[in-house]
Amino acid sequence: MKKLVLAALGGSLAGVILTSQVGPLIAEEAKRDSSVYEQLDLFGDIFERIRAQYVEPVDTTKLVEAAINGMLTSLDPHSSYLSAKDFEDMQVQTKGQFGGLGIEVTQEDGFVKVISPMDGTPADKAGIKAGDYITHVNGEAILGLTLDQAVDLMRGPIGSEIIITVVRKGTPDPFDVSIIRDTIKLTAVKGRVVGNVAVLRITTFNDQTTPGVRDELKKAIDELGGKDKLEGVVIDLRNNPGGLLNEAISVSDDFLDSGEIVSTRGRDPAEGERFNAKPGDLIDGKPIVILINGGSASASEIVTGALQDHHRAIVVGTKSFGKGSVQSLIPLKGDGAMRLTTARYYTPSGRSIQALGISPDIVVKQPDPPPADPAQDPASETAAKSRSEADLRGAITNDSMTEDEKKLYLEEQAAAEESAKLRDEDYQLAYAVDILKGLTTLAPTEKP
């Protein structure tokens, strides 16, 4: 009986406390609403004064769009307003073909910062690098412009020239770069075989990415003569600025049998999402090395974080960009859209890489190429090659190998020399291939 009375008494007290708090809460809510309405009245007053008193007639549509964009860009670098044309351009870009320079950019300290140039695009061919700052476009300073306004300055007719002024770390003075605008046709995935390793270069995450990964991997396996000949896969995500979240999830799923890939958490905990892998690994557990650098962002970091946390891949290169937020595209009246940051994403271990990036398991910097020597010619290069016993006239033969064994040995030697050439072309990729060869060498062989 005492317990029942106490419970009832507690309920009564709680009711009294709740009732006593309702009045102040309503008053506080009303005060907040009043403040919002006052601010909206202020906005309307300013808008009307600009329309009536500004020194020149103004386009009210542009004025409203600028106000909306200013509101959104004040939140973070990735939230913005998209006009009907910009929204249409973005939808075209996700299909893999659009006009422009071929760079993914963000805004930092009022300037445009290059996240990464896209492979084979005009910007890439002109030597633009991840981390470059663009300060002027055709001589016009972009300090003070929104990111979308700066991007608009860089757009133009295909075939037209644009001159951008670049500030680069390690270079004392700003310099101009001339670029010819072109149609950007993105090949999301490029594959090749190095030794017995399949190299998948993923340049972006658009509608073509997952099919591209599967097609290029199949081609590599067919070229090697079967999956049993495959030693491993290098997934090259360097300078990949990201793209569609669902593509990052499906690419990760292709190399995982189970477990979480990524989770997203927004303002309301109830709206968080968790994405898990389905059974089926395209390469049946064979080793993977992922290459990243400072230009690897967003969707690239989702794939890297998922495979790294599941100990499914060794990550090689330098620290990634650190974009750990999710943007939602919300269509608006007038065919425009709002790009709004609505969540952060978390890797399977529960870490957010926002503003931190993903640290590679093995840090490998890409050395600058050696300066070209114009005095060098093919004759001198041939003369500089080392000579061996086999080159000496009258050298005796090796009698410990059959002809077939000797042929196999020479093929293996040629493959090793081909890998060595790769170090001059791409040191980080050569390092990744060497890791996979080492893992294959150390892997226990099945007993008959």
Image (tube, rainbow, N blue to C red):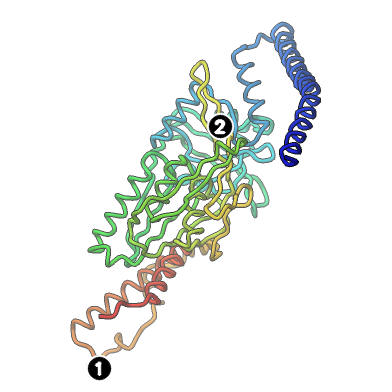
For the C terminus, give its image quadrant.
bottom left
Q: Mark 2 points at which residue?
A: 151
Q: In this view, does 359 lie to the left or right of 119?
A: right
- Label 1 element class: loop
Question: Which residue is pictured at 69% across the width and 10% down the height?
Answer: 56
- Residue 441 position within the rendered picture, expressed as x and y whole percent measured from the top left: 38, 76
CA gap, disc 2 to disc 1?
Answer: 69 Å
Looking at the image, is 30 positioned above or below residue 223? above
Looking at the image, is mark 2 or mark 1 earlier in the sequence? 2
- Front of the two marks 2 and 1: 2
Q: Which residue lies furthest to the front in this view?
A: 1
Q: Which amino acid does label 2 sit on?
A: Val
Looking at the image, is 167 positioned above or below residue 85? below
Answer few, some or many: residues within 10 Å of disc 1's Cα (few below 14, many 20 plus, some between 14 and 19). Answer: few
Q: Residue furthest top?
A: 52
- Label 2 element class: helix
Query: CB atoms at circles 2 and 1 under 8 Å apart?
Result: no
- Residue 409 position within the rendered picture, expressed as x and y whole percent measured from the top left: 27, 80
Q: Which of 336 and 185 is in front in this view?
A: 336
For the N terminus, give its image quadrant.
top right
Q: Which of 39 and 269 is in front in this view?
A: 269
Q: Where residue 91 is drawn, which disc sits there?
A: none
Question: Which residue is pictured at 39% across the width and 41% down the height?
Answer: 186
Q: Which of 5 and 429 is in front in this view?
A: 5
Q: Mark 1 points at which residue?
A: 396
